[in-house]
Image (cartoon, rainbow, N blue to C red):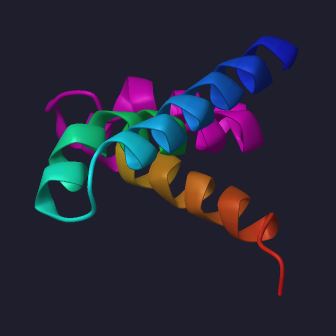
Amino acid sequence: MMARQMECERLHKALYDCHRRVPAGTGRETACRHLNRALAECMVAAVCPDESEAVRSLCSSGGTNLKRSQCQEAQLALSVCLSSHQQE
């Protein structure tokens, strides 16, 4: 958990630096997109590690009807997990 937290903090700093370095607009969106996605994935994995890993492994490629069904179930489980951590 600590390693993931440190990784998320590193990505957050990199994204912050990217936003400071690149002027607002389409250029920033393009330049910082990979960092934004990586930080989002890191945070999701930190909050719901098992569900995140299930989605990553079951939804990574096409496959049988069974695998697609398992992917959908994993996505639903991840959504429920994330919802349970939202503040109202």
* Residue at x 38%, y 30% (from the top left corner): 58
Closer to the camera, 56 or 21?
Answer: 21
Closer to the camera, 30 or 87?
Answer: 30
Closer to the camera, 57 or 82?
Answer: 82
Residue 79, compared with residue 56, is above or below; it is below
What secondary structure is the magenta-colored segment mainly?
helix
Q: Position of residue 52 (x, y in %)?
A: 57, 36
Locate the C terminus and report the quarter of the image it occupies: bottom right
Give the quarter of the image for residue 68.
top left
Tell me the magenta residue range: 41-70
Give the quarter of the image for residue 62.
top left
21 relative to 29 in the view: left or right? right
Q: Position of residue 74 (x, y in %)?
A: 50, 46
* Residue at x 69%, y 32% (from the top left corner): 49
Residue 65 highlighted magenta (yes or no):
yes
* Residue at x 47%, y 39% (from the top left corner): 15
Q: Position of residue 19 (x, y in %)?
A: 41, 48
**Count of numbered circles in the view:** 0
Q: Position of residue 2 (x, y in %)?
A: 86, 17
Give the quarter of the image for residue 56.
top left
Closer to the camera, 12 or 39?
Answer: 12
67 relative to 46 in the view: left or right? left
* Residue at x 83%, y 77% (from the top left corner): 87
